[in-house]
């Protein structure tokens, strides 16, 4: 079971690295699909078929197709045209901020006490998941929605060339 998990995690990481490092936007979108599929396989391996199916249908299917269609409508397949030249100091500042965020998230995850047992067990039905998302996990759910909104605004700015009219 652990071997499958690490194999599927490797597929996700390879997809994520390919997405970030590819200069062609269409190839980046396809690597994103690969990363989504790897994550869905992890869900299936962890005996969460509902989450795996949702991951495959919503993200690997609908969102990825939407991104590819938007890229093709805009007609910019090469990021080298719009990528600004950044100085080395800006890259170090960005890497330092990312490292700080990861360290803070790691500290928060290790210092937060987790319950040892759950009386009800994991939520496997869609209705149970909806109740949890809108009650106990309302704040992370809303933060994820804000993150998706910020990503869509960034995609729109990239599509328009970064200039507001």
Image: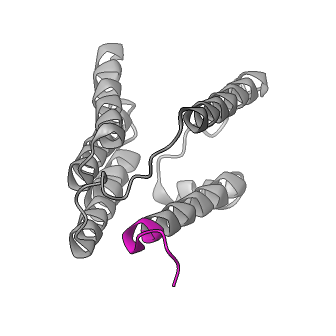
Q: How is the image coloured?
A: one colour
When the figure is inspected, residue 22 is found, relative to residue 61, above or below; the finding is above
Residue 31 in view, yes or no:
yes
When the figure is inspected, residue 17 is found, relative to residue 153, above or below; the finding is above
Q: Residue at x 27, y 66 (%)?
A: 71
Look at the image and give the residue range highlighted in magenta.
Answer: 156-165
* Magenta region includes residue 75: no
The N terminus - image quarter:
top left
* Magenta region includes residue 161: yes
- 24 and 68: which is toward the camera: 24
In the image, 68: left or right of 42?
Answer: left
Q: In the rendered picture of this protein, how many numbered marks are placed on residues?
A: 0
- 5 and 87: which is toward the camera: 87
- 36 and 56: which is toward the camera: 36
In terms of image quadrants, where is residue 21? Answer: top left
Q: Residue at x 30, y 28 (%)?
A: 8
In terms of image quadrants, where is residue 122? Answer: top right
Q: Residue at x 48, y 66 (%)?
A: 152
Residue 118 in view, yes or no:
no
Residue 83 percent across, percent down from the top left: 39, 52
Residue 124 percent across, percent down from the top left: 47, 46
Q: List the single residue furthest toward the bottom.
A: 165
Q: List the single residue furthest toward the top.
A: 3
Residue 121 percent across, percent down from the top left: 58, 37
In the image, 127: left or right of 36?
Answer: right
In the image, 150: left or right of 113?
Answer: left
Q: Residue at x 71, y 56 (%)?
A: 139
In terms of image quadrants, where is residue 92? Answer: top right
């Amino acid at each position: 079971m652990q071997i499958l998990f690490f194999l599927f995690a490797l597929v996700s990481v390879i997809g994520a690295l390919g997405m970030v490092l590819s200069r062609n936007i269409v190839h980046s979108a396809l690597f994103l699909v690969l990363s989504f599929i790897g994550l869905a396989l992890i869900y299936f391996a962890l005996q969460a078929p509902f989450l795996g199916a949702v991951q495959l249908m919503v993200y690997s299917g609908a969102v990825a197709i939407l991104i590819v269609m938007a890229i093709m409508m805009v007609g910019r397949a090469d990021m080298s045209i719009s990528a600004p030249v950044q100085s080395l100091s800006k890259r170090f500042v960005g890497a330092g901020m990312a490292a700080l965020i990861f360290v803070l998230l790691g500290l928060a995850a290790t210092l937060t006490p987790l319950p040892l047992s759950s009386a009800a067990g994991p939520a496997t039905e869609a209705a149970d998941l909806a109740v949890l998302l809108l009650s106990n996990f309302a704040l992370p759910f809303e933060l994820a929605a804000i993150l998706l909104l910020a990503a869509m605004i960034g995609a729109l700015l990239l599509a328009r060339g970064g200039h507001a009219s």
